[in-house]
């Protein structure tokens, strides 16, 4: 996986790199969520998505390997009056709870192919029957349509990759195309993304 120390250095900046508002794809599925549901936010960095979900009344666990990011997440949560559970861990080595969550939020977490496969298997197994996986990631894009995200092609996503990694999950929504991002200073402008909403069969 990527260098945790490098992310600590990035998150040491005073500003929130990806803003404090939740991801738009995650916000768009809020009507499917209910207070008391258990949510897992993967690689949530400074906490914008876990704080949002906790504000909806969900019981939230956020896992990230950057201590600096999680410290900012804790501050954001305190300001919002919510208390997600923050865990510092490498997702490829974390002990994934089996059938422990009603929602897994995988928002802009870009991993090398082997690590991605490990995390995808853990995320799918962590869903309860009927549980949802919400994913957004950068996809290959023409020059000038990349509002942040990795440059290395192997870290990017496609529709086919979603279908390959989550064969046992039902596809509720699956989109690949251009969107306009406005998520802090690091995600600004038109970008090519994959957005998915998947469900573990009951």
Image (cartoon, rainbow, N blue to C red):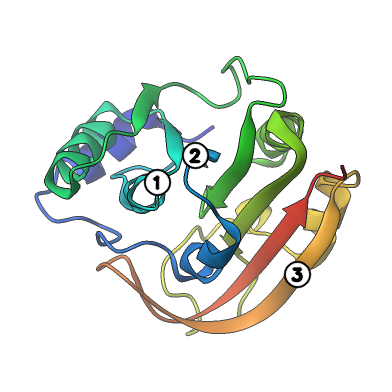
Quick one: quadrant of the N terminus?
A: top right
Horizontal side of residue 103 vs 45, given as left or right: right
Tag 3 residue = 174
Residue 198's mark? Answer: none
What's the residue at 46%, 70% (across, down)? 24
Q: Observer-nearest residue: 155 or 174? A: 174
Looking at the image, the residue that sits furthest to the front is: 35
Asked whether the residues under the numbered discs 3 and 2 touch, taking CB atoms below 8 Å apart as contact, a structural biologist would say no
Please provide percent x and percent y for residue 181.
42, 77
Residue under numbered circle 1 = 57
Task: Please give the name of the residue rendered at 60% of the width and 61% of the height, measured from the top-left corner.
Answer: 32
Disc 1 packing (10 Å; few <14; some 14–19; many ≥20): some
**Is label 3 in a helix, a strand or a loop?**
strand
Between marks 3 and 2 in the image, the one whose residue lies nearer the viewer: 2
Displayed quadrant of residue 71: top left
Q: Which residue is drawn at 40% across and 43% down?
A: 44
Q: The residue tagged with tag 1: helix, strand or loop?
A: loop
Give left or right: position of 126 versus 41.
right
Pick the front one: 197 or 120 = 197
In the rendered structure, which disc, 3 or 1, sits on the residue that comes first in sequence? 1
Going from N to C along the chain, the mark reached first, 1 or 2, is 2
């Amino acid at each position: 996986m990527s260098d945790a120390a490098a992310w600590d250095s990035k998150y040491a900046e005073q500003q929130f790199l990806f803003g404090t508002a939740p991801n738009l794809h995650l916000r768009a599925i809020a009507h499917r969520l209910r207070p008391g549901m258990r949510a897992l936010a993967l690689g949530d960095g400074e906490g914008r998505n876990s704080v949002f979900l906790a504000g909806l009344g969900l019981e939230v666990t956020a896992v990230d390997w950057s201590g600096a990011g999680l410290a900012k997440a804790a501050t954001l949560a305190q300001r919002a009056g919510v208390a997600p559970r923050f865990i510092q861990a490498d997702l490829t080595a974390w002990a994934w709870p089996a059938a422990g969550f009603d929602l897994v939020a995988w928002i802009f977490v870009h991993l090398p192919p082997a690590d991605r496969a490990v995390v995808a298997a853990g995320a799918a197994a962590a869903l309860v029957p009927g549980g949802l996986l919400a994913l957004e990631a950068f996809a290959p894009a023409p020059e000038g349509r990349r509002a942040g995200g990795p440059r290395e092609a192997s870290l990017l996503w496609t529709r086919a990759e979603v279908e390959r990694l989550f064969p046992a999950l039902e596809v509720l929504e699956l989109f690949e195309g251009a969107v306009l991002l406005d998520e802090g200073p690091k995600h600004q402008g038109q970008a090519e993304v994959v957005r998915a909403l998947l469900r573990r069969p009951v």
